[in-house]
């Protein structure tokens, strides 16, 4: 058996995760790689990582495989946001049932849209919005965009994460609302309680 240095294995793993996320509606795997710079505790980060991988493992199983390319999942402080589009209302419920069975999930926010009308053009537009927001929020003074997750579906942007203050939250939402092609913003983020002195 060929021995592969750990540094190369890590690089290959990150590349595979990125490729997987690019080939389907992302399921939160890429977020795991950037998470250590966030304000989440190591314990919470570990829990969110485990939740993300458990959901993906179930989605790749026989029972839920049909949903893998339709839904995106983001876990933040044990809150799971489901976004994307499904063709049938029962699949929206199936997605909730799937996540409900995952250990460590504190709350499920199911924002899946039920529609038959979601094609390449809409998907490209949503990708453009998400990418534009990454650039805009990263360049906005006095916010830590890494503490937020956002998904665009048919021009509606869904947000979870934890703001350091109400002012920061207001700034983030204002940037999103003013971004080209964004039709609507639905916020599920919260303000993190101040740390005890």
Image: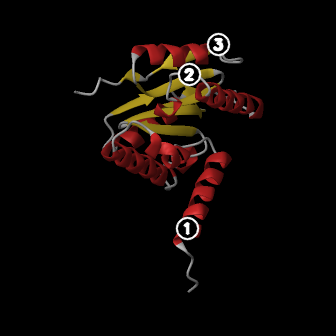
Task: Give the image location of residue 12, x and y in percent.
Answer: 61, 63
Residue 94 in view? no
- Give the Cα distance between marks 2 and 3: 16 Å
The percent coordinates of residue 21 (x first, y second) are 61, 47
The 10 Å Cα crowd at callout 2, few under 14, some 14 to 19, many 20 or more, is few
At x 64% / y 13%, what residue is drawn?
178
| Sequence-wise first label, 1 or 3 | 1
Look at discs 2 and 3 and give the one toward the viewer.
2
For label 2, the residue is 141
The residue pinned by badge 3 equals 178
Instruction: Give the residue displayed 59% in from the left and 26% down from the top.
Output: 137
Q: Nearer the viewer, residue 20 or 5?
A: 5
Q: Which mark is residue 7?
A: 1
N-term mark: 2 or 3: 2
Colour mode?
A: secondary structure
Q: Secondary structure at mark 2?
A: loop
Tell which tag, 1 or 3, sits nearer the viewer: 1
Query: Can you tell which quarter of the image residue 117 is in?
Result: top right
Furthest residue toward bottom: 1
Q: Position of residue 33 (x, y in %)?
A: 51, 49
Residue 180 lies, in percent from the top left, at: 71, 17
For mark 3, give the secondary structure: loop
Observer-nearest of 10 and 185: 10
Q: Are the residues flagged by discs 1 and 3 in contact, CB closer than 8 Å?
A: no
Q: Are marks 2 and 3 in contact (CB under 8 Å)?
A: no
């Amino acid at each position: 058996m060929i021995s592969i240095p750990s540094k190369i294995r890590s690089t290959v793993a990150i590349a595979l995760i990125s490729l997987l996320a690019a080939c389907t509606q992302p399921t939160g795997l890429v977020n795991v790689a950037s998470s250590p710079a966030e304000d989440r505790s190591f314990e919470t980060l570990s829990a969110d990582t485990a939740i993300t991988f458990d959901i993906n493992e179930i989605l790749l199983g026989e029972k839920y495989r049909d949903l893998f390319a339709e839904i995106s999942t983001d876990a933040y402080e044990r809150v799971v946001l489901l976004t994307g589009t499904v063709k049938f209302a029962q699949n929206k419920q199936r997605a909730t049932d799937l996540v409900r069975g995952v250990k460590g999930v504190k709350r499920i926010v199911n924002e899946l849209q039920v529609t038959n009308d979601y094609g390449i053009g809409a998907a490209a537009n949503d990708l453009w919005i998400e990418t534009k927001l990454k650039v805009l929020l990263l360049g906005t003074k006095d916010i830590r965009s890494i503490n937020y997750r956002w998904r665009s579906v048919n021009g509606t942007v869904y947000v979870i994460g934890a703001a350091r203050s109400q002012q920061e939250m207001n700034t983030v939402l204002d940037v999103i609302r003013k971004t080209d092609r964004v039709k609507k913003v639905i916020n599920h983020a919260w303000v993190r309680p101040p740390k005890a002195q």
